[in-house]
């Protein structure tokens, strides 16, 4: 209600009712949907190229992360040697309409990712009139940080977490008599899920900053529970990449732990949070 009370005019000095606010919000949502649909149409047209060059790139042994791992282990012979030779994941389609629906759904979900900054900006145009000037400065920083961290998380998901997960699971066999035949549906579901999960995980500093400014979270919390966090984040990294290789485990763990430390740096101390 405080938001509505302060979001009290339409730019012409006229009082806005509750239903006027709903109309404004509906307009914001419709414009956001229009942007997402427009981007999805463009992506639909170029999706076959995106599949070959981007989405299916981790299926090939020459993917950038695999080549980087191979160079690192070549320089450090005490690590398990990583090779890119012979690695290739063949995907199969087992349902008649799957490829068509995956073409549509992948276009939509990638459009949602690309349109994320526009959606936040349109949301800002709705919220901004209800904020005081000092509040606007803080929210601008939060929106900018949220955008940057989300896309960094998506990039980490694409270049690190998903390829490591794919490499391990594609080569894992419970028995030599059971070959892996990976369906397109399973691949795309895992691909999109990990990208979105990592994008959301990288919003941790923003959430911590907001909770800190609300007085719910204090910097002392991070110092008290740092050792617990290290154990918990190691378990999370092991869950995301279920591999016994400590090198790949640390590749996933270190960015997530860096988020924890970044959150600790931007949350105020107990005295300043009062």
Image: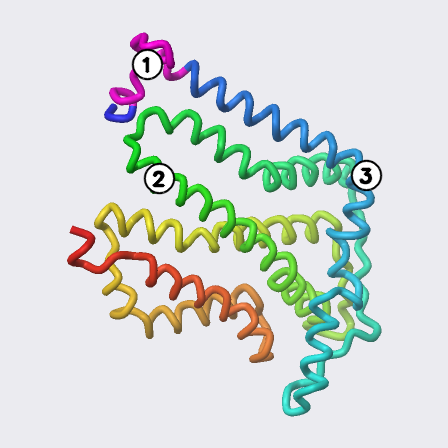
Q: CA distance from mark 1 to mark 2?
A: 21 Å
**For numbered disc 2, what is the local secondary structure?**
helix
- Which residue has dot 1 on it? 9
Which numbered disc, 1 or 2, marks the residue that appears first in the sequence? Answer: 1
- The colouring scheme, among rainbow, by chain, secondary structure or one colour, is rainbow
> Which residue is located at x 31 percent, y 26 percent?
130
The answer to whether marks 3 and 2 mark residues whose Cβ atoms lie closer than 8 Å is no
Residue density around tag 2, few if under 14, some if 14–19, many if 20 or more, within 10 Å: few
The quarter of the picture where residue 14 lies is top left
Q: Position of residue 64 (x, y in %)?
A: 73, 66
In the displayed structure, 40 sits above or below 71; it is: above
> Which is more toward the observer, 133 or 229?
133
> Which residue is located at x 43 percent, y 14 percent?
23
Q: Is residue 151 left or right of residue 258?
A: right
Numbered range of the magenta stretch: 4-22
Q: Position of residue 16 (x, y in %)?
A: 32, 11
The quarter of the picture where residue 83 lies is bottom right
- Which residue has dot 2 on it? 137
């Amino acid at each position: 209600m405080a938001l509505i009370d302060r979001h009290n005019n339409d730019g012409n000095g006229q009082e806005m009712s509750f239903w006027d606010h709903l109309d404004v919000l509906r307009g914001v949502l419709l414009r956001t949907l229009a942007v997402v649909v427009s981007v999805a149409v463009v992506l639909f047209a170029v999706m076959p190229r995106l599949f070959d060059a981007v989405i299916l790139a981790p299926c090939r042994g020459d993917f950038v992360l695999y080549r980087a791992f191979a160079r690192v282990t070549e320089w450090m012979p005490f690590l398990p040697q990583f090779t890119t030779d012979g690695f290739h994941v063949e995907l199969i389609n087992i349902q008649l309409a799957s490829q068509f629906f995956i073409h549509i759904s992948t276009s939509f979900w990638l459009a949602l990712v690309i349109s994320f900054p526009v959606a936040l900006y349109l949301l800002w145009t709705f919220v901004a009139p209800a904020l005081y000037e000092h509040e606007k400065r803080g929210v601008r920083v939060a929106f900018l940080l949220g955008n940057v961290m989300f896309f960094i998380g998506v990039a980490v998901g694409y270049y690190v977490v998903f390829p490591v997960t794919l490499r391990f699971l594609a080569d894992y066999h419970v028995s030599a008599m059971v070959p892996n035949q990976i369906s397109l549906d399973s691949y795309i579901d895992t691909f999109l899920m990990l990208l979105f999960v990592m994008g959301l995980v990288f919003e941790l500093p923003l959430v911590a900053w907001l909770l800190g400014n609300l007085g719910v979270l204090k910097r002392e919390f991070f110092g008290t529970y740092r050792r617990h966090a290290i154990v918990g984040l190691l378990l999370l990294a092991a869950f995301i990449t279920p591999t016994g290789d400590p090198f790949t485990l640390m590749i996933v763990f270190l960015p997530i732990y860096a988020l924890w430390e970044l959150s600790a740096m931007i949350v105020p101390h107990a005295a300043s949070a009062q």
